[in-house]
Amino acid sequence: MKKFLFGSAALILVMAALFFGNYYWQCSRLPQYMKNPLNTEKEVGRQMHRISVKKETFISVYYPKFFHANIDSTIHAAIDDLVDEFKHEKGRLYIDYSSYDLMENYCSVLLTIDQNGVVTHKAWVFDLEEDEIITMHDIFSADVLSKLEALIEYEEKGDQEAVSSLDDLKNYYLSNQELILFFEHAEEKRVAISLALLKPWIQPSFSYLLIEDSNVRIIDPTKPMIALTYDDGPHPEVTERILNVLKENNSAATFFVLGSRIASHHALIERMIKEGSEIGNHTFGHQDMRKLDKRQLNDQIGAWQDALKEVDATYQMKLVRPTYGATNDFVVKNTSYPLILWSIDTMDWSKKDCDYVVEKVLKEVKDGSVILMHDMYDSTAEATEILVPELIKRGYQCVTISELFNAKGIELEAGHIYHEAN
Ligand code: NI
């Protein structure tokens, strides 16, 4: 009996040694990058590693195990398919994963599959308590489809296949308040959609997925939007009033401040950045850019940036608004930033008349408008207090210049002049 026990123990030890020996021997032959998982988020599941090394075929797979039969077999089956398909090919198959804890027993799993440098993804949302896959039907009501189509079409600029049913959308996951969809084309395409845009269609049992955070502005690229811009500030009272109304309406604007005014208005500049507004360069001392030489022009832009560094060393200024809206070949050639003009001039600086400003904007505004104002006059603050809620009521989103052009798919280029986003 003793002999038998000893024999069994020895056999188990030998088998374990062979198993681990084989694992480490194979592992040692893997290309270096395949020996470790990527530095991705792995919030749930136990990390497992599977390898196979044969002559010219190297396979290394990291995947999560949840100890729930259905979920584990779903992941396993997907990996088995990939490995079986690859095992007779030459080269490298490297699979790693991210997993996200979605609270209340739900989680997302994303496999990143690298087959000889061609990267694709496979994703799921699981219910850990019920040991089930969560489908798009579970999360959304069926009439979300037309909204999804509009958002996907916008993202893909029409370059996508039609989605005829929610059942077509199987390869998806949720993370950080976003729905991420994968489409198989010649090349894989990834579309990320903010969950907040889909709020009206989220089933009550999944509404907890939406973290209501009033500080987060969500821009719907399929809806109209405009950019309010303010030059020559900041001004202690006027700018403050404008920032207040923007904040109350979950909106943002672009402030083309003067470099010479930054040092004395640190707090206002910090507030603009914190509340999601954008800051652009309007030169240091409001010099007519056409009348400068190259060195003076660089000094005007550079001194502005030095002043801003004292407030926020990490802020990336991306825009220049030429003083007086005045440009010529010299200015265009020598400014290494996009030059932002406007499509609606409110004349606020000359008329100082709130009603005139409001009327002019509401008469001329359209999707993509860039509106010029100056945060220097009480009448401009007053007009802004009327305009922001009114524009929202009329279906416009008040966004920054960068957000506006980005949403319209227009890349802002250095030394180009822009009037509106159309
Ligand atoms: Ni100006």
Image: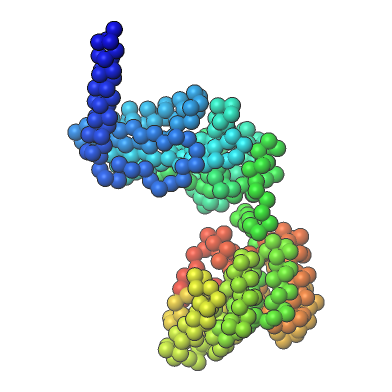
Compared to residue 375, the image places residue 56 above or below, namely above
All told, the count of numbered labels is: 0
Residue nearest the observer in this picture, 119 or 358: 119
Residue at the image point whose x is 68% and y is 57% from the top: 214
Residue nearest the observer in this picture, 208 or 350: 208
Residue 131 visible here: yes
Residue most extreme to the right? 355
Compared to residue 263, the image places residue 60 above or below, namely above
Residue 43, horizontal then vertical, whole percent: 50, 42
Residue at the image point whose x is 36% and y is 31% from the top: 82
Residue 316 visible here: no
Residue most extreme to the top? 1
Report whether 215 appears left or right of 415: right
Residue at the image point whose x is 76% and y is 74% from the top: 383
Residue most extreme to the left? 55
Compared to residue 363, the image places residue 182 above or below, namely above
Residue most extreme to the front? 2
Residue 232, horizontal then vertical, whole percent: 63, 83
Residue at the image point whose x is 78% and y is 70% from the top: 386
Residue 110, horizontal then vertical, whole percent: 46, 40
The quarter of the picture where the C terminus appears is bottom right
Report whether 17 appears left or right of 109: left
The quarter of the picture where the N terminus appears is top left
Colouring scheme applied when the structure was drawn? rainbow
| Residue 375 placement: quadrant | bottom right
Residue 251, horizontal then vertical, whole percent: 68, 64
| Residue 341 placement: quadrant | bottom right
